[in-house]
Amino acid sequence: MSAPRTAAAPPVARIGDIDVLRGCALLGILLINAQLMAGPAVAHGGGAGSGLADRGAAWATTALVSGKFYLLFSFLLGYGFTVQRRSAERAGVAFAARHLRRTAALFVLGLVHAVLLFPGDILMTYAALGLVLFALRDVRPRRLLRIAAVLLVSLAALLLAYGLLALALERTQGLAAPAADTGAAYRGGPGSVVRTNIELLPRFLGANVLHSADLLAALLTGLAAGKRRVLAGPGPRPVLLRRVVALGLPLGLAGGAFMAVCTHGPLEGGWFFVGQAAGVLTAPALTAAYACGVLLLVRVPAGRGIGATLAPAGRMSLTNYLAQSLALALVFTGYGLGLYGRLGTTTVLLGCLFLYAAQLALSTLLSRHRRSGPAEFLLRAATRGGLPRRARWTPGTHHS
């Protein structure tokens, strides 16, 4: 099935809503990755000197953040795929070659990121799923949404079946715990950090493969939305945005709370996977509610300043994602302070807020002089097969 032709579409400036939502997603991604890089106990409210506040922070992060913001980022990547395709068609260049170069560069960048900084890298997974996205580029939006729904239901059914089996067999352990010497290895020298990243990489890749189903579902939903230009022009009507918030927020919060109960107790063991199944089905609702809530906020006069603050960080989302990993590695590994396993959950999350605020400020400053960050510059060069022309970014002239 083929989609309507897009080559005749008039040139459009980069869509501001995409940048705002990417900037918002960076915070959620940071909160989750920081807990993983700080040590396994942190995500469960443990760690040095942990108390009720740490357990509450871990519970809230699982309920409100876990599994939500990677979905938002995936949706935006799927939407951006259509923007890039139209850009290639307007320029009269082969989109297939551009996209393949882009995915290859993203994979290499992700591999370097995983080995040097964080084995939980998501860029390699996005590169692989980008090939699937390309294969489905001409499928009509309605069919894309059906495929996305099948992917979500299938993953949820798999997790639910495993969880029920674990309960029937009275298994008491959810996920495998990291080796006891992981902390010492991460607090060692740079060589020890790299070796540990390589050792843990297969485990993280396995988790990414499992959850590639819901990531792909979000990518396909974004592709469908991009085909319909949902975020183009004035964007969705406020009445529609409010409706999504009203419907998605209670459903998503209920699913997130159940997932947190199954992760942190009192339900444990096989209930972990039952909670994950519920999370897979309800996280898209909360993600959509978050996104629509942000779009409503930045459309009112009091919220426009927030949008203006988030957008520069969103335009440099790849640079900021990598910079987050670098900063966290300097704090938690032998690259710097070596605080792996030595901080509580609340301390880690508060540190994330300071880091995110710094990224927003630096992104705003950099956007006054450059149209993108260094990682975006390199990725664009690889995508186009050569170094792009250096130019200052000015509102209304920045294109994908």
Image (tube, helix red, strand yellow):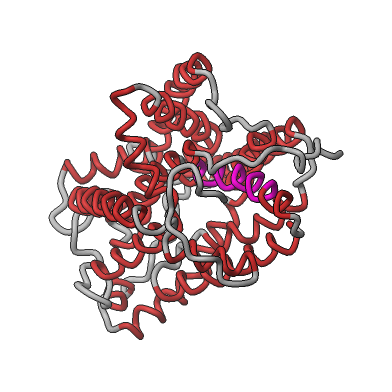
Q: Position of residue 170 (x, y in %)?
A: 48, 46
Q: In the drawing, does residue 362 fall left or right of residue 93?
A: left
- Residue at x 29% of width, y 65% of height: 327
State the residue in front, 5 or 72: 5
Residue range (magenta): 71-86
Q: In the drawing, does residue 45 fall left or right of residue 278?
A: left
The quadrant in which residue 118 appears is bottom left
Residue 82 colored in magenta in the image: yes
Magenta stretch secondary structure, dominant = helix
State the residue in front, 347 or 386: 386
State the residue in front, 197 or 107: 107
Mark yes or no: residue 158 visible: no
Q: Position of residue 300 (x, y in %)?
A: 36, 22
Mark yes or no: residue 198 visible: yes
State the residue in front, 230 or 251: 230
Q: Position of residue 281 (x, y in %)?
A: 55, 33
- Residue at x 20% of width, y 48% of height: 350
- Residue at x 34% of width, y 60% of height: 324
Tell which residue pokes out farthest to the left in this image: 49
Q: With respect to residue 126, does 179 lie above or below?
A: below
Q: Position of residue 175 (x, y in %)?
A: 44, 55
Q: Quadrant of the N terminus?
A: top right
Residue 191 colored in magenta in the image: no
The quadrant in which residue 385 appears is bottom right
